[in-house]
Amino acid sequence: MTTPTAVVARHVNRDLPGRPTRRPSSAVDFDALLREHHSDESWPETEASVDELARRGGDLVVGLSNQNTRVPGLRRVLDRLAHHPGDTWQERWLNSGQENDYKQRLDVSGDKQSNTHGLHLLLVLGAVRPSYGWLKANQFKTWHHILQLRDPGGYACLERAFEALGRSLYDNRAASVVLAHVSCRTGKTVSEITGDDLLAYQYAMKSFRLRGVKVKVAGIHHAWDCLKHMGTIDHDADTLRLAQLQGQRTPTELVDQHQIESDHIREGLVRYLRAREGRLDYSSLRSLSANLCGLFWSDVEKHNPGIDTLSLSEDAAADWRRRLAVKADGTERRSRFNVMMQVRAMYLDIATWALSDASWLPWVAPAPVTDADVAGNGKAQKEAKARSHQRTRERAPEVDRLLQATEARLRSTTSALAAAAELAKGDELERDGLRYRRIGSSRVMLRPAGAVDQKSDIDLSSEEDEAFWAWATVHLLHQTGLRIEELVELDQFSIQRFKHPKTGEIIPLLHVYPSKSSSERLLAASPELVHVLARIVHRLRQPDGSLPLTVRWDTQEKRTQPAAPLLFQRYRARWKAMSYQYIYGLMDKAGEWARLSRSNGEPLKFRPHDMRRIFATDAQSSGVPIHVIAALLGHESIETTGIYAATYPEEVIRAHNNFIAHRRASSPQPEQREITDEEWNEFQQHFVERKLSLGTCGRAWGASCEHEHACVRCSLLRPDPAALERFIEIRDNISERIEEAREKGWLGEVEGLEVTLFAAEDKIRRMTQLAAEPSGPTQLGMPSVRPNAG
């Protein structure tokens, strides 16, 4: 089925009354979908008599609770509606004022419960079709019963879909409410509801306010999934989210988004974007349209009504440049030079093209931006580079804490999930000093003992899933420096292997597909990166050995990518590709676990591009040539790489070292003389004497021990994991000595012993962490080489 779309109307002046507004043709016409639901046509049920409706209702309520009160309640509701004008029950319903007073529920005499049952039966019979606002405002508890009575067979299929998708009872009831609303409004059964019906419902709920407050719409995405599983929904999109997303728009549609008043200028902008379209990707074309049409010409028209030429006066051009420099909130617009250069390029392009094509002559005009106006662009770029370097220097020292925090979180959640997964439903365990009982069956969920609601539930499955993907994201970005769009595009075939022709050694490689720069590249996978990739593949692998095929929406190009075995996908009712927002959320969570904060106390947040800059900085600091770093990052120019790496250029460091050597040669000092054999032997002996029973001493050569050989307390001691038992004995002995000193009142000695005890415990903790680190090989499970398409 083709999604209904609006037709692009011819450009008209929006000030003229009664004229339609231009609308992008690729956008879903939600208003048209809603108009189909507000049809004035009649249907048999709304024209039926009271006796006929009562007879049909009597047949439906057989076997239900309160059976004897339902039909009498229906008659009272119909009798009340009969007092209002109209030829059908729908007309009488509208004239009764129900749609204007959502909570009225018909002012009829009699038992309230009986009246409610009668109103429900009225909706089941379909004699009236209330608006979505009325249906949403009256949150009855038996919407799923209404749905079941209207279509028993369809509801049975829906229940089978609930069971297959494995969602919670709350999610299933929420989806039933949505489908019941659509069914009551459209008169359709469950099996007849289409994707357009759900889109119209979603659109109606976005603008609906109850007492001035926006209402929450739950269950609509699950309802879409259920209909897809049932095979009754005939929409091309797999998910509701994909159905709502707008695809690529034409240059005409991009321009019409900004409602340009002048037909002449609008035509020129459309022609210019069409001419540039072939040389730009869609993201760049969209950005160019926003700058030229939004920040430039729409602003000019707003402050110069009636203008119909690209030729601006000096005052108008100066006023526009001044407004461009400041955002609506009063802050500086740092992209102003880029906008001015794009505007200037448009004027120069039109003038150049007019020399060979006279059709461009009507738009030839002097550019409102001169060389002097963009002279500050160089300074702005240097300031941007300085901000980038400062951001990198602020975050680079915290990377280790970020990595360690994700590892610790993953170990904690994995062990907690493993312990709780062994419990049967209803069994209890103790966690953080509290008693919990397991309530989930398909998912491992805990609820505090004695609690009856779900506010304090702990979803251990979600916690472990979140911890794993945060760990995988942070470590993979740290090892590769990938862009976020490259990260979410990785799939099973990105893991390649290369066999050395001479040695036969298998070298794992990470294949990064064309993305931003349209240049693919291969990265040699380090053992740490191989470990991360292996765990991801192991987590996603299906019983048949394959990875799930998932469709991904490209947010930059605004189009759906072909199904692929993506590495960054997770299961939520179905396998879904991870979005940019989810990746950002994972990195924010990792920062919270590491308790990272800035000097002003605000949270220190990492983004994928921060890890990319840190990767470039570490590589350059390690002596990797800058052109090699550019190849690893996929940069077309080493100047871009220089902006990323927050270090001094190599030639500056070399020149400074030469300067220091020259000064030393011109003014030799005693310590700069040649070393003697005795001094060399003494230097070598120093490293022999560093070996201790508890580890290795890290004091500098020629330095004496300033701690009187109190090695347990010394921060320069690097403990040997093999001496762990010896340290435990020392710790226990110190604890006994502290107790003895306290009993005899030797308070001065207690303080010194406590310092030693703290140092011993710290070294035991460090050795325990070293001993716990895995040392064995990791099985990668490499996929086979992708066969040629031909």
Image (tube, rainbow, N blue to C red):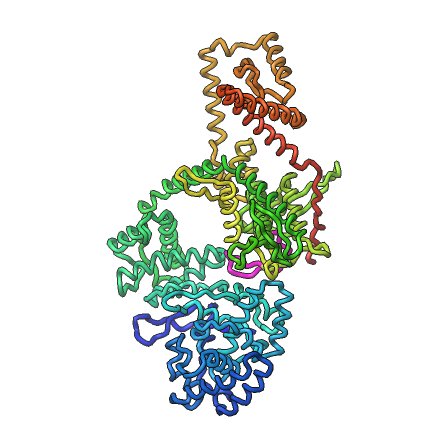
Q: Where is 664 relative to 473, above or below?
A: above
Residue drawn at point x = 45 percent, y = 72 percent? 136
> Which x, y percent locates residue 224?
56, 68
- On whether residue 126 falls in the magenta region, the answer is no
> Which x, y percent locates residue 79?
43, 88
In the current view of this chain or complex, which residue is farthest to the left? 315
Looking at the rendered image, the quarter that the N terminus falls into is bottom right
- On whether residue 559 falls in the magenta region, the answer is yes
On the question of residue 631 being in view, the answer is no
Judge by depth and name the residue closer to the eye, 68 or 338: 68
Residue drawn at point x = 59 percent, y = 20 percent? 697
Judge by depth and name the residue closer to the eye, 237 or 61: 61
Q: Where is 392 relative to 789, above or below?
A: above
> Which x, y percent locates residue 63?
60, 81
Q: Where is 533 relative to 220, above or below?
A: above
In the rendered structure, the answer to whether residue 163 lies left or right of residue 699 reads right
In the rendered structure, the answer to whether residue 603 lies left or right of residue 12 reads right
| Quadrant of the rendered image containing residue 291 | bottom left
Judge by depth and name the residue closer to the eye, 176 or 145: 145
Judge by depth and name the residue closer to the eye, 467 or 367: 467
| Quadrant of the rendered image containing residue 229 | bottom right
Looking at the rendered image, the quarter that the C terminus falls into is bottom right
| Quadrant of the rendered image containing residue 211 | bottom left
> Which x, y percent locates residue 351?
37, 56
In the current view of this chain or complex, which residue is farthest to the front? 743
Residue drawn at point x = 50 percent, y = 11 percent? 671
Q: Where is 88 relative to 576, above or below?
A: below
On the question of residue 456 being in view, the answer is yes
Q: How many marks?
A: 0
Q: Which residues are magenta?
A: 552-567
